[in-house]
């Protein structure tokens, strides 16, 4: 449960992958094995193959998974109030924190590329530019900020289905996906206000997303690993537009010159960048899997 709490504390902060924390704690192999079994069970049930689904469920290490998920849930519940308050009262510094965390994750992902040829670099640059431009459209065309202030209920379902994919991608944070979708603040508010309906739809979306997309992502990583990783790095770099601290932290995609808390924001970003790289180095020093080993697990037959 304590390990789950540490993973949940990482998961709720954009830029730090809970999977990376699992690597440092030496439990990633057990986690991914149970996730694979659970997603296979869900997929079998969607195909109306109840017998195979029940068989896969027996492969899930429930005595390990249930306390772990309990710890993750406790971390999200106990820390969401603090994060919501910090985002409101210290928007610039929090955006700088997230910016440094995501940049560190991008560096780790770059180290995982085994082929850095022209096609892969073109994919990386193309995705980065496309995402960067797309994230600016909402600001320039509608005048609204990137953060969705009052999302429809279907948005919680959809964001859950997309964000869960980060759990099975190396080095990327589910919370970062929520920031990119403009749903991070809305989900935090749902947790703090105990909005059961919104949270329930998010969880159902995550379950459906895990069933539908986990095997597809597994095959994509297995068969087109470097192209997927290049696109992932481009996604992270292009999405940094959401995390530019000025003028309103993560509530805008407008790009303004630094005008407030400049020194503090730079220092926070540098420290956050170093923390991500330090966590990966700590995992190697402790003799546990590195993020590179995480990729080997994900792409293994």
Image (cartoon, rainbow, N blue to C red):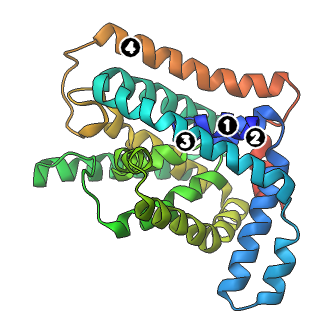
Q: Earlier in the sequence, mark 3 or mark 1?
A: 1
Question: Which residue of the protein is positioned furthest toward the top in this rendering?
Answer: 263
- Alpha carbon of mark 2 to alpha carbon of mark 4: how far? 35 Å
**Element at label 2:** loop
> Residue drawn 13% across and 48% down?
140
Residue at left 31%, top 36%?
Answer: 250
Of the two numbered discs 4 and 1 in the rendering, the one whose residue sits closer to the viewer: 1
Q: Nearer the viewer, residue 129 or 28?
A: 28
Residue 155's image quarter?
bottom left
Name the residue tied to disc 2.
1
Q: Earlier in the sequence, mark 2 or mark 3?
A: 2
Screen quadrant of the N terminus: top right
Disc sitting over residue 266 in the figure: 4
Q: Nearer the viewer, residue 79 or 14?
A: 79
Q: Is residue 117 left or right of residue 138?
A: right
Comparing 63 with 205, the one in front is 63
**Which numbered disc flags the more N-terminal residue, 4 or 1?**
1
Pointer 1 residue: 5
* Residue 38 appears left or right of 113: right
Place residue 109 in its image quadrant: top right
Instruction: Provide residue 222's location: percent of width, then percent of height.
Output: 73, 62
Query: Could you give the CA–CA distance between mark 4 and mark 3, rounded to whole angstroms?
Result: 27 Å
Do tag 2 and tag 1 residues touch (Cβ < 8 Å)?
A: yes
Of circles 2 and 4, the one toward us is 2
Which residue is disc 3 drawn over? 76
């Amino acid at each position: 449960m304590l390990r789950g709490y540490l993973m949940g504390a990482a998961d709720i902060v954009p830029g730090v992958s809970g999977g990376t924390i699992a690597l440092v704690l030496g439990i990633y192999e057990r986690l991914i094995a149970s996730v694979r079994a659970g997603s296979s069970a869900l997929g079998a049930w969607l195909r109306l193959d109840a017998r195979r689904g029940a068989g896969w469920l027996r492969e899930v290490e429930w005595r390990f998974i249930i306390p772990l998920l309990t710890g993750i849930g406790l971390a999200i519940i106990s820390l969401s109030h603090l994060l919501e308050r910090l985002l409101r009262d210290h928007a610039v510094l929090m955006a700088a924190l997230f910016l440094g965390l995501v940049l560190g994750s991008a560096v780790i992902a770059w180290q995982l590329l085994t082929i850095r040829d022209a096609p892969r670099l073109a994919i990386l640059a193309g995705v980065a530019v496309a995402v960067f431009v797309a994230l600016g459209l909402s600001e320039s065309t509608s005048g609204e900020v990137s953060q969705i202030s009052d999302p429809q209920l279907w948005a919680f379902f959809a964001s859950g289905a997309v964000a869960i994919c980060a759990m099975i991608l190396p080095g990327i944070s589910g919370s970062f996906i929520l920031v990119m979708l403009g749903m991070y603040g809305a989900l935090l508010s749902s947790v703090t206000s105990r909005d059961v309906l919104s949270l329930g739809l998010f969880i159902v979306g995550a379950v459906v997303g895990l069933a539908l997309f986990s095997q597809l992502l597994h095959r994509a990583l297995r068969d087109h690993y470097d192209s997927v990783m290049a696109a992932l790095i481009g996604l992270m770099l292009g999405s940094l537009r959401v995390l530019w601290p000025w003028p309103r932290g993560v509530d805008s995609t407008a790009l303004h010159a630094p005008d407030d808390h400049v020194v503090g924001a730079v220092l926070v970003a540098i420290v956050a960048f170093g923390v991500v790289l330090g966590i990966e180095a700590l995992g190697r020093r402790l003799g546990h899997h590195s993020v590179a080993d995480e990729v080997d697990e994900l792409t293994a037959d």
